[in-house]
Amino acid sequence: MYKPVSRMRRLIPVLKQDGVDTDLIMLVRTILAASKEIAFRVSQGELAGILGSTLNENIQGEVQKKLDVLANQLIKEMLLDDESVRAIASEEEEHVVAGHSTGRYIVAFDPLDGSSNIDVNGQIGTIFTVYPAREDVAYDSCQQFHQPGINQLCAGYILYGPSSLLVLSTGGPTRCYTLDLTHGGYLLTKAQMNVPRDSCEFAINMANYRHWSRVTQAYFDQVLYASERFRHSSVRWNAAMVGDVHRVLSRGGIFLYPEDARLGNETGKLRLLYEANPLSLLIEKAGGKATSSGRRTLEIMPKDLHQRVPVVLGSVGPVDDFNSAVFSA
Ligand SMILES: O=P(O)(O)OC[C@H]1O[C@](O)(COP(=O)(O)O)[C@@H](O)[C@@H]1O
Ligand SMILES: [Mg+2]
Ligand SMILES: [Mg+2]
């Protein structure tokens, strides 16, 4: 049944009711203000001149898309105007960006996740996370970010799809909001996302099979040819972690990006700070499981701003299954 948008709950009152600190609410608002501008430009596509690549490479050695650069600039500049922000880390910035020395929070983000989908009108998103600033290290030092994921005060993503969605946890349940284009705000559309305990859908880039370790290959040989759980399975791969994780949050399944033998991927492809950790928090707060090399991702102590880790997350059943097959082999 259609419910008028004027009757739906807006984000800020929900955060207030959840007891979220006012400064943190304002910070989330800042990130979301940037996201609305990105969402608008994404919806305009070619008309907004956002398609295509720049001539630059980021610190990861990846060619930056125009939208990577634009989204990074928008979010960074808006965050730097916020006095509660002490330091920023971004996929598109080699070093920590200094904010306000007395700010209470540090923010890490992937301005545009799924960049290879931009030019094909596929799923893309923005991932962000907020930690408390550390008092024991310099305000603009990368050590600000040497904190395990369990310290996150808030984590979320915006998925720029047919509708733009915000999925957010401020330490409580993982909630989903939809961007209302009539009034321009995020409205609560799912008060609590729940990852089913079991599912036979899996998301992995199977083209990397030849680069995986023997145990990972053996696990997938069994998934494809012998497993009862996966007898009627489907494989799904969006090439955007936000899109894949959103599907897992919505209807269960397992998402995997293991380490492989390719240069640069020896410890995984996905970045701990601004990809694995925020999405792991959202998965856990929705009753799922998020692991890296068989251990809880949120307990890893980061050593580097752009550290890469293997990622296995989703429904508890298949995540446990993978880890016991691969790590007790
Ligand atoms: O092209 P591949 O190797 O399948 O990798 C896809 C993965 O790379 C990523 O796109 C990396 O994100 P960026 O677009 O932010 O670099 C993930 O979102 C996704 O899961
Ligand atoms: Mg990414
Ligand atoms: Mg990115």
Image (cartoon, helix red, strand yellow):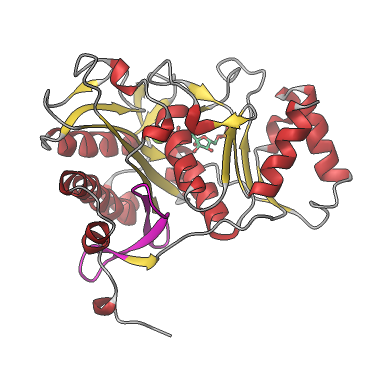
* Magenta stretch in the rendered image: 161-187
Counting from the top left corner in percent of width and height, residue 188 is at 33, 66
Q: Quadrant of the N terminus?
A: bottom left
The correct choice, above or below, for 52 with respect to 285 in the image is above
Reply above or below: 284 against 91. Answer: below
Q: Where is residue 55, by image quadrant?
A: top left
Q: How many marks?
A: 0
Please report the residue visible at 88 percent of the width from the left and 44 percent of the height from the top: 225
Q: Is residue 41 left or right of residue 260?
A: left
Q: Position of residue 202 (x, y in %)?
A: 68, 48
Judge whether residue 184 is colored magenta: yes
- In the displayed structure, does residue 226 sit left or right of residue 79? right
Q: Where's the C terminus, which quadrant?
A: top right
**Residue 311 visible in the current orientation:** no
Name the residue located 38 percent from the left edge and 68 percent from the top edge. Answer: 189
Image coordinates for residue 85, horizontal then vertical, percent: 17, 32
Identify which residue, 123 or 214, lies in the foreground: 214
Could you say where residue 237 lies in the image, as x and y percent from the top left? 61, 46
Q: Identify which residue is drawn at 41% across, 29% down.
A: 273
Can you name the residue that lies furthest to the bottom here? 1
Which residue is at the far right? 226
Work out whether 247 lies above or below 189. Answer: above
Q: Is residue 203 visible?
A: yes
